[in-house]
Amino acid sequence: MFSDSGLILVKYSSYGRTDNNTCGINWHPSDSINTSCSLKISTIADRCNGLRVCEVKTASLGTPDPCYGTYKYYNTTYECINGPFADKSFRNCISESPVICERGYSTLDCGTSLGDGTIQIINANYGRADSVTCSSGLSDSLIENTNCYAPNTFSTVATLCNGQSRCAVEASYNVFTDPCSETVKYLTVSYMCTSKCEGKSSCEIPATNNFFSDPCVGTFKYLTIAYSCI
């Protein structure tokens, strides 16, 4: 999958067979008789959401067999969502995906430059998906496993950071499970900055330097807001 205009957002993925034509070449006709075979899966979305380019080795996904004896295929529908700060609005503001090497820290920030913004996690993985990232000075044996994904990464980061203006995350097996103990890992996170008040019936916004940063030190400032009820 590839998005030249933004980031990947997987809408639907399935494994099975729903017709006789797709991936039917060089296979015995009896292998494709069952066309009511479809298993919805989330692993492709877990690995690809928030990325610009994503290649998945289907043999490594470990998907259960929904119809034994039928030749199957993966079917994925995705769309490209706006790239980093595409129009400066919270609705379409996607952060660059930070990469945090093992034992490192990083802060996801929707407050300093964006004012009234809160974090919405799109995707996260603690593990290793390539042999280049966070590989400086390491032997091949420590980076050769590129099919390493901690299954609880997204839920852990989302629980920690969703709804916050700023959130510190650590790339450590003490925070996540260790999916490949003999491999040096890293944490990747893709997140969106959304409006703190959008979609709510009421909302409080503090007029403070801590929330918005200080644009003019020594000057007494105020906050102006224009809004409408829909």
Image (tube, grey):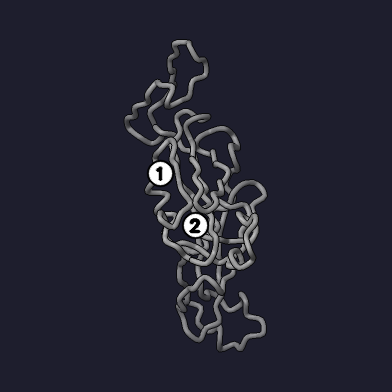
Disc 2 packing (10 Å; few <14; some 14–19; many ≥20) = many
Is residue 170 visible in the rendered image? The answer is: yes
Is residue 123 visible in the rendered image? The answer is: no
Q: Is residue 102 above or below residue 61?
A: above
Q: Is residue 104 above or below residue 216?
A: below
Q: Position of residue 119 (x, y in %)?
A: 45, 40
Q: Is residue 59 above or below residue 209?
A: below
Q: Position of residue 22 (x, y in %)?
A: 61, 74
Q: Work out how far the residue at label 1 is from the one at label 2, CA to CA, in angstroms.
A: 18 Å
96, 148: nearer the viewer? 148
Q: How many marks?
A: 2
**Could you tell me if the residues under marks 1 and 2 are in contact, i.e. CB atoms within 8 Å?**
no
Q: Residue at x 53, y 55 (%)?
A: 186
220, 93: nearer the viewer? 220
**Amino acid under label 1?**
Asn
Give the SS element for disc 2: strand
Q: Which label is found at residue 98?
A: none
**Amino acid under label 2?**
Tyr
**Can you tell which of label 1 and label 2 is closer to the viewer?**
2
Q: Position of residue 42 (x, y in %)?
A: 46, 63
Q: Residue at x 56, y 57 (%)?
A: 78
First in sequence: mark 1 vs mark 2: 2
Q: Is residue 157 above or below residue 128?
A: above
Give the SS element for disc 1: loop
Residue identifier under label 2: 126
Q: Which label is found at residue 162?
A: 1
Displayed quadrant of residue 73: bottom right
Horizontal side of 212 relative to 84 (left or right) equals left
Displayed quadrant of residue 146: bottom right
Disc 1 packing (10 Å; few <14; some 14–19; many ≥20) = some
